[in-house]
Amino acid sequence: MTEYASLLALVPLLPLFSALILLFSKLPKLWISIFAVGSVASVALISLFFNVIFWQQSDFVLTASLGTWINIAQLKINFGLYLDPLSLVMITIVSGVGALIHLYSTGFMYQDNDLKRYFTYLNLFVSAMLFLVLADNLLLLYLGWEGVGLCSYLLIGFWYQDRKNNLAANKAFLMTRIGDTAMAIGLFLLFTQLGTLDIQEIQIKAHAVWSLNNDNNTMASLCCLLLLAGAVGKSAQLPLQNWLPDAMAGPTPVSALIHAATMVTAGIYLIARNSQLFQLAPDVLYLVALIGTFTLLLGASAAMVQTDLKRILAYSTISQLGYMFLALGVGAGASAVFHLMTHAFFKALLFLAAGALIYSLHHEHNIFKMGGLLKKLPVVAVSFAIGCAALASLPFTAGFFSKELILAQVIASGHSGLWWAAVLGAFITAFYSARLFFVVFLGQTQLSPNARPTKSMSLALVILSVLSLFGGIHPEGLKSLMPQLDTDGLSTLQHWLPIILPFIAISLAWWLFKTKRFGKPVPAFMQGVHQLVKSGWAFDRLYQTIIVSPFNTLCQVNKDDFIDLFYRLIEKTSGRLHMVFSKFQNGQLRRYNASLILFCILAFAWFISGELML
Amino acid sequence: MIPISWVFMLSLSLFVIGLFGVLARRNLLFILISLELMLNAVVILFIAASRYHSASIANSDGQIMYLLILTLAASEIAVGLSLVVHMYRQHHHLDIDKLNKLRD
Amino acid sequence: MTLFILLLMPLLGGLLAWYSERFDADLPKKIALLSLLLCWLPLIPLLSSMPFDASSLPNSQWLIDESYPWIPFFNINAHLALDGLSLLLILLTLLMGLVALSSAWHEITKRTGLFYLNLLWTLAGVIGVFLAIDLFLFFVFWEVMLVPMYFLISIWGYEQRHYAAVKFFIFTQAGGLLMLISLCALVGIHYQQTGILTFDYLILIQNPISGDLAFWVALGFTIAFLVKLPALPFHSWLADAHTQAPTAASVILAAVLLKTGGYGIIRFVLPLFPQASIQLAPFMMLLGVIGIIYGAMMAFVQTDLKRLVAYSSVSHMGFVLLGCFALNIYALQGAIMQMLAHGISTSALFVLVGMIQHRYHTRDLNKLGGLWLNLPKLSAFGLFFGIASLGMPGLGNFVAEFLILVGSFEQYPILTIFAASGLILAAVYSLLLIYKTFFGPIKRPHDSKITDTNTKEWCTLISMCFILIYLGLHPQPFFDLVPITLMKLNFIAADIGALL
Amino acid sequence: MLDNMLNTIFIITAAIILISALLTITAHNVVHALLYLVITMLAVSLIFFILGASFAAALQIIIYAGAIMVLFIFVTMMLHQGEKSLAQERHLFHFSTSITALFLSSMLFFELIFMLFLTPTDSANSRVTAPSSAIITVKDIGTQLYGPYSLLVVISALMLLSALITAIHISKSPVTSEIKTKADNL
């Protein structure tokens, strides 16, 4: 097995080298794209090669080490890479979808004169993500984690001239940074309790140390809670989710890669990777499921009322991630990762198709201004249709297999309440994806496309469509790694309802589209609710009032440093004292004599009082 | 013989009168005059003290001290008066309060 | 004799530079460059003879130890010694001297000779501080490094340079005097308790003084170093000194002068007063955390670029204070690493601010904006160092902050959580810095004569980038170099994972 | 019999001294003040006679009353202040400005009185007995002067010399000319 170690070592380093080469070189555009796509494509090939070797094997491990990082007393951390079924799936997704998106963006971004900077950031992002996924210890994972956050900040704010993009980038970075700091505290706790940061060792030691007496697995649940906070920050789950819709300010391939396929899935990977640790904290697992459910409902409802094409997809990503968290919460890690894979395919497809749409309709985002584009952009229309079908999890699409599996697992684990919420979420998902498709592609055309998507873009779209249709193969390796619940004890209702629901939702959407009710303003009494849901349940305003503005006013109040004021006060008082004393020097001789005599009187008085005392 | 307390009273009151003169008057000449008074007060005390000293032989220290004070008074008045003349030439008045140029 | 050569080189260089101004205007800077480069000579044999791996740890703590009688009456001798810690800091000093020189190359035009005299004498003072083992000599160098810095700020500074220079001088001088008092008290008590009158650190460390007076002497020393390492109540001189100092002076000030405070705590307070430092630890850690949060909040609202960077170094130095008094091996290594990483990243930021000021003659954030379009290379460096200062993993600051927080978490978890919130605030002001200067719409018409970074500037900045990355990815040689075990620091047993 | 006559003479002269002293300091005209001062001086010399210091009394009349007061009168004549100085004097010295001076000197007076007479004198050194009646002749003073106190003579000679030099220097310097030019162009 070790001869592949050097190959494994290449996986994260290739994109890094190409990023450095791009950074320091002055290549023409063609060469830039060749380097960028080439590096990620070669990593994709390597991961395919690994897939072929370890096809359907469930217990293989491949490790490689790039040298020691920190080695003091008990803190031994090195740049170790660890490949097992879970991380194999992840690197396949990251590099596969990444390569397709790189291919797509060579076409999409070609006329942008900052192509070099774009591809440097994109390659840096892919290498950081690969480090994250392949890290064998939590600190290296944290390095990838922050690197990914940094690259998403840089890419969201890629068109830096526009104030809005920068603010969105800052918001994204800060929100994820809050989660990362919580995760860092989790790391400290883990290190002080277990003495190591190596992921596999943590799982073993955690079981050894904490499962003995179940009273002190409060420490375990504390660690898991902190790690969960990090995951929530990165995967845009309930408390920290309102940065994702604003992150759509970046170029569309970036949204496809980062905010659909790879970065947002890091949180799920973290929980899946530490699944044994999470087993020790059942209450935290239930919390994960709860967060997942609420987020999925929030995302779905918000997506239903959006008008901006990319914000709809952003909210749908949030809700699909909610599904994955729900699966993790009920203990079905494998199905979560499976859904992650299929989601990566069809969400990337949807984003790229949306990108092609925007590219051809010269940067128009509002879906109600588009219409009847079925005939004009056939490739985009077909791929968009497949993507929406997979999103709505119509039968025989990739989305169908993974979502049904999750719903089955939820029922099998006995959380029927969560199941009903998930089914409602699925219904709304189907509804808004159908609404999206009908409004954009059917009806009369308002904007006529002026540029057709280039060959590379169409190629990427085609491949992704194929993957979203037939990518529903459940990777075997995952089953052994994470516990699987048998799903044969379902009642007929629980089995058939999730299959029929998408069709009902689509017909409802068709009926509404036919009666022209989609673009119309909402009736008066519904206006408040509509606005609330449209703004993502007003989390932005909430955080603005309870955190951002108090912090601003607090800092503004103390602008010139009241401690400095204290020292300036000293300076002023000494100045004023000087003025007082100078009054005595006024050059009047008689006044000097008088003070002389006064002093004699006082001296005698003091002497006399001394005498009297005796 | 005159009890010494009387001499004390005399010299003390003379001294205080001289002091009042120095403090109250604003004319430099009058200040010098009251200064003279204060000197005389002191001299009386010196002479009386040596007179009442109970040493067997006659004690003449007081008179010698008188001599010294005399020379002191003479030289002091000489300088004082030349200053007065000088001041009068410059300022044409002898008011001491106006002389506060040293302040700044 | 090598240490004395290392010390005399900048002193003589300074004098020569000053004298040479008479012949030619830009001769002083060449001489200054020459003398700085010559300073590296004494260190070369040392660096080469010590391969960078853990096995070859020198048995005794001191790599070079030289002592000559100076004032025999008080048994004070000019005792200089170099160990891992001071070697690291001296390397940083020399490096930052070169950086300061490069940034002052074109910027300083009037009275260049005197400028380079002050610059080199400050460096000599600092090198002396890092080498001095005799406490009296330490105090002498403590003052020597202060006076030329005062002139640097007050002659070549910007608008309110006199106010800033005087404030800087009074603050550090007050600290220095406090240290003199506690130094004499220390020697006095030591003499009473052991009958040996000595200022020598090595003897003083054999039997540290005990009793409640020791606590007050320790407090005196610590406050003196807190003034220099700007901890919270004494930090207000830093913002003014930095904003009004010329670029070269603020590079030296940020990179090196602040580290003398941290170095003093590690070298003198912790080993000399073991019990007192354990008693002092909780308060100082609290002070550190407040400093982190307070510095970050102050940096967040500044409109002047240099003030923002100055307050950010108050926050970073709060981490160093937290690390020093966490009394455990990770935190101490982290503190030393933070001093190095902060030295490089903040002085790089100052060089950049100097370059921006040199081109646009303003430091006001509201007037700056959209530099990326006109100066892509400069903005790229600005982005890199801004990201470094917020503690991005893979760069030096993160490794330091991580170690400090791990070490202090083990002692006081709650305090560390607040300190960790400092990481978020660091991100807030760093992003603000990057956004306000480099991104956003262009506010000022672009005139063509403003050029991007020239080769000299590009080299200094790129070398600093590589050092930061090297610090971040391969910090091991720096950890091995500092002989924590030999420094007689009695740490609270690091009972990490002792449950197993 | 002789004693109470001496006492009465003493009291009369003391009264004269105090009255003339008061008159000197309250006089508006400088010459009146000087004349009262001369009277004081003569009364003081009488006191010396009563106290048996005949040499001192003689000196007092010759040098103090004779030389110094004459010098004083010379200087006041030289300044020929005339009428306006009288008016000026009246406004320079009147009751309201001297109230603080009066208060201070009276405070000092009572404190000294209190200290000298009312505080309980410790018995050790208050053995003021009747004055020895031996007459002190000028010869005794001479031998004392050139015996133990020879240094005193030298010092007083030096003092007189220095006073002489300063007096000449101050009154000689032609300062008046510069002041005039400056005064004109002000």
Image (spheres, coloured by chain):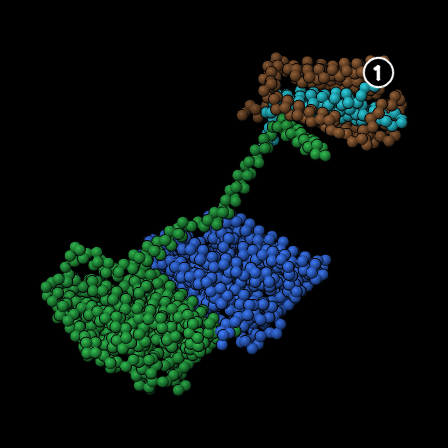
Q: Amino acid at mark 1?
A: Asp
Name the residue nearer the viewer: A363 or D14: D14
- Category of crowding for the residue at label 1, using alpha-carbon neighbours closer than 10 angstroms: few (below 14), some (14–19), many (at least 20): few
What quarter of the picture does the C terminus of chain D occupy?
Answer: top right
Q: Secondary structure at mark 1?
A: helix
Letter of the blue chain? C
User: Chain D is which colour?
Assistant: brown
Residue denoted by label 1: D3
Q: Is residue D117 above or below residue A80?
A: above
Q: Is residue A264 visible?
A: no
Residue at the image point whose x is 23% and y is 66% from the top? A300
Q: Say which of C174 and D154 sits in front.
A: C174
Residue A552, visible in the rendered structure? yes
- Residue at left 28%, top 66%? A294
Q: Which chain is displayed in green in the rendered image? A: A
On the image, which quarter does residue A210 sit in? Answer: bottom left
Which chain can be seen in cyan? B
Q: Nearer the viewer, residue A71 or A493?
A: A493
Q: Residue A460, image x and y in percent?
A: 24, 75
Could you say where residue A500 lies in the image, as x and y percent from the top left? 16, 75
**Residue at 54% of width from left, 25% of height from top?**
D185
The part of the image, by quadrant, that contains residue C67 is bottom right
Is A472 above or below relative to C222? below
Residue C290, position as x, y percentages in the image? 47, 57
Spot occupied by residue C442 in the image (x, y as percentages of width and height): 32, 56
Q: Is residue C139 above or below residue C472?
A: above
Q: Say if B50 sits above or below A320 in the image.
A: above
Residue plotted at (64% across, 25% down): D104
The reply, left or right, for residue C353 in relation to residue A47 is: right
